[in-house]
Image (cartoon, helix red, strand yellow):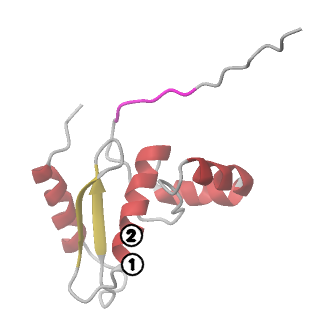
C-alpha cells in the first residue's frame, strides 16, 4: 500500500483547489485524513466560513470509517436511516456526513469487530 504522507496530502489539497467548480463563486475547504481518520491537512480558502473545515474533515473521516465515498454513504443513510443513525452514535461523531464530495484514498488497512455472547449461568 502506498503510505499517505504530508507531501501527498498537500498535493491532494492542491488538486482539490485547482479543479473545476460547478459554482466558481463558492469558497472551498478541504481535508485529508490518514487511514485512522486523523487530520493530515485541513485548509480553507480566505473568506470561507470556518464551519466548512469541520464539514470537510467529517466527510474525509466518514470515507475512512465506512470505506466508501460520501455520495454512497448518503444513499445508505437514506435507505437505512436507523442503521446510519445508530452507526453515527457508536462512532461518536467520527462519521455522519452523508453528503457527496468525500472519497476514500484507495486501499486501506482493514478492521475487525465482533461481539461476544455470554452464556447464562444456570
Please tell me which residue is depicted at 14% across the width and 58% down the height of the picture.
Answer: 11
- The answer to the question of whether label 1 and label 2 lie on touching residues, with beta carbons closer than 8 A, is yes
- Find residue 1 and name its label: none
Task: Indicate the quadrant containing the N terminus: top left, top right, bottom left or bottom right.
Answer: top left
Across and down, in percent, residue 76 comes to 63, 53
Residue 54 is marked as: 2
The one nearer the camera, 52 or 107, is 52
Q: Residue 53: x percent and y percent?
A: 33, 72
Given residues 30 and 106, the one toward you in this image is 30
In this rendering, the answer to whether 43 lies above or below 112 is below
Q: Which mark is residue 51?
A: 1
The CA span between labels 1 and 2 is: 5 Å
User: Where does the image place residue 52, in percent across and percent down from the top left?
Assistant: 37, 76
Residue 97 versus residue 38 in the image, above or below: below
| Region rendered in magenta | 108-113
> Residue reaching furthest front?
122
Amino acid at each position: 500500500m502506498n503510505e499517505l504522507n504530508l507531501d501527498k496530502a498537500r498535493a491532494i489539497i492542491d488538486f482539490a483547489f485547482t479543479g473545476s467548480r460547478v459554482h466558481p463563486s463558492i469558497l472551498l475547504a478541504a481535508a485529508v485524513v490518514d487511514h485512522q481518520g486523523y487530520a493530515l491537512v485541513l485548509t480553507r480558502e480566505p473568506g470561507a466560513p470556518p464551519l466548512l473545515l469541520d464539514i470537510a474533515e467529517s466527510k474525509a473521516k466518514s470515507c475512512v470509517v465506512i470505506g466508501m465515498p460520501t455520495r454512497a454513504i448518503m444513499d445508505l443513510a437514506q435507505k437505512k436511516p436507523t442503521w446510519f443513525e445508530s452507526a453515527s452514535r457508536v462512532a461518536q461523531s467520527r462519521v455522519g456526513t452523508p453528503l457527496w464530495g468525500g472519497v476514500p484514498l484507495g486501499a486501506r488497512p482493514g478492521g475487525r469487530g465482533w461481539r461476544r455472547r455470554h452464556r447464562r449461568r444456570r
